[in-house]
Image (cartoon, helix red, strand yellow):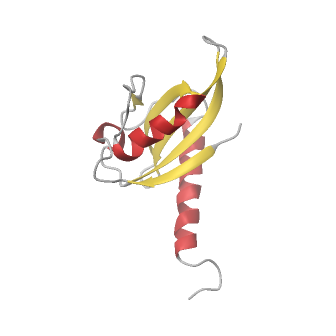
Amino acid sequence: MEFSTLSVARGPNSPPVLWRDAQRLVVVITTHADVGKGTPGLFAYGVDPETGAVMFSHSFAADGLGEFLRFVVDGAVQHTISNVVEYPNPPVEPPGPKAQVLVDYARVVRSGEEFAQLGGPGQT
């Protein structure tokens, strides 16, 4: 299974329903077969890398990725995003990859960012 990720800082227009108290989300995206329509689709999961909480999941057609990411970042959408599932804390098991895999992956992404901000090895 392949993952694509986007690490996003909360902005002034980020939708509270997806972010709750998180200040940063790692959005993990993976593919799935949309058996209902026979077209490829995507699953997106929002993980708070600080707490390990799965904040949401969303399933959509691959051509809806840009619109969904605009919604996550600044709440801007042209169409209604209707099937976003907000997870309670502690999270329930989402469809697709196991929740713990998502959480561990999000924490690794965040650790890599923090390491890069420090300048990497040999920097003082």
Q: Residue at x 64, y 13 (%)?
A: 35
Q: Residue at x 52, y 73 (%)?
A: 117
Q: Looking at the image, which residue sits at the far front?
A: 78
Q: Is residue 39 left or right of residue 111?
A: right
Q: Is residue 90 left or right of residue 33?
A: left
Q: Quadrant of residue 43?
A: top right
Q: Residue at x 39, y 23 (%)?
A: 82
- The answer, for residue 104, to whether it is visible in the render is no
The percent coordinates of residue 50 (x first, y second) are: 43, 55
- The answer, for residue 2, to whether it is visible in the render is yes
Q: Which quarter of the image is occupied by the C terminus?
A: bottom right
Q: Quadrant of residue 11?
A: bottom left
Q: Residue at x 59, y 34 (%)?
A: 98
Q: Of residues 85 and 82, which is closer to you in this image?
A: 82
The percent coordinates of residue 66 (x first, y second) are: 51, 38
The percent coordinates of residue 4 (x first, y second) are: 62, 45
Give the vertical position of 96 relative to 37 (above or below). below
Give the vertical position of 123 relative to 120 (above or below). below
The percent coordinates of residue 14 (x first, y second) are: 33, 46
Q: Is residue 61 left or right of residue 16?
A: right
Q: Quadrant of residue 2?
A: top right
Q: Looking at the image, which residue sits at the far top?
A: 36
Q: Which quarter of the image is occupied by the N terminus?
A: top right
